[in-house]
Amino acid sequence: MKSQSRYAKRYAGKTPKKRQLRINESIRDVLSTAITQGGHIQFENLSVTITDVRVSVDLKSAMIFIMPLGGQNKDEALEILNALAPQLRTELARKINLRYTPKLRFELDLSFESADIIFDILQSPQVKQDIDPDHDKD
């Protein structure tokens, strides 16, 4: 499993402010629209879901977590989105009025893989016997 990014380590445990949350959602909306309706040739065969946006405390950088449809072509999707980040940042500057337009960085959302691992653990026989209500206690 991939280790935490620099962003995750730096801001781990800090609760985002209301303004950050509002900006996160605004960025997500603008980028979702830009990707689906932006007319970029690179996006024609690419279906991506923006699962989360986390803007830094100083609002100068934003981490955008994505997951391609079906989990396919992850590396290709990341490569395309990170290559188009400057163009998407320009689009973001047009739509959202901020003093600084955040620098965009795209990463894969690994929470789905973590959820699958946890689900597999919960389905294992060792765990099932511990949570089975019919299991006799000695």
Image (cartoon, helix red, strand yellow):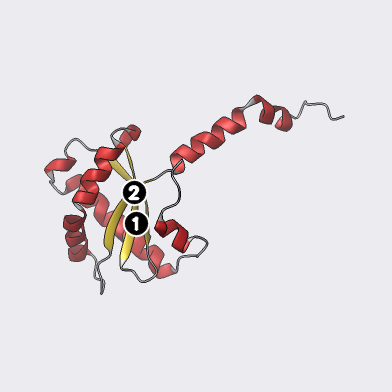
Question: Is label 1 in a helix, a strand or a loop?
Answer: strand
Position of 50 relative to 54 (above/below): above
Q: In which quarter of the image is residue 101?
A: bottom left
Q: Residue 132, how many percent across, how many down?
A: 72, 29
Q: Residue 99, how many percent across, how many down?
A: 25, 74
- Residue 12's tag is none
Residue 47 in sight in this render = no
The amino acid type of the residue labelled 2 equals: Glu
Q: Name the residue at the bottom extreme.
A: 99
Left or right: 21 as drawn, with respect to 81: right
Left or right: 55 as drawn, with respect to 80: right
Residue pointed to by mark 1: 63
| Circle 2/circle 1 CB separation < 8 Å | yes
- Residue at 59 percent across and 32 percent down: it is 121
Q: Quadrant of residue 10?
A: bottom left
- Residue at 26 percent across and 41 percent down: it is 77
User: As rendered, which of 3 and 43 lies closer to the eye?
Assistant: 3
- Residue at 18 percent across and 58 percent down: it is 86
The amino acid type of the residue labelled 1 equals: Met
Locate the C terminus by quadrant: top right
Q: Residue 68, how many percent across, how many down?
A: 31, 38
Position of 85 relative to 69 (above/below): below
For disc 2, the neighbor class at 10 Å (few under 14, some 14 to 19, many from 20) is some
Question: Is label 2 in a helix, a strand or a loop?
Answer: strand
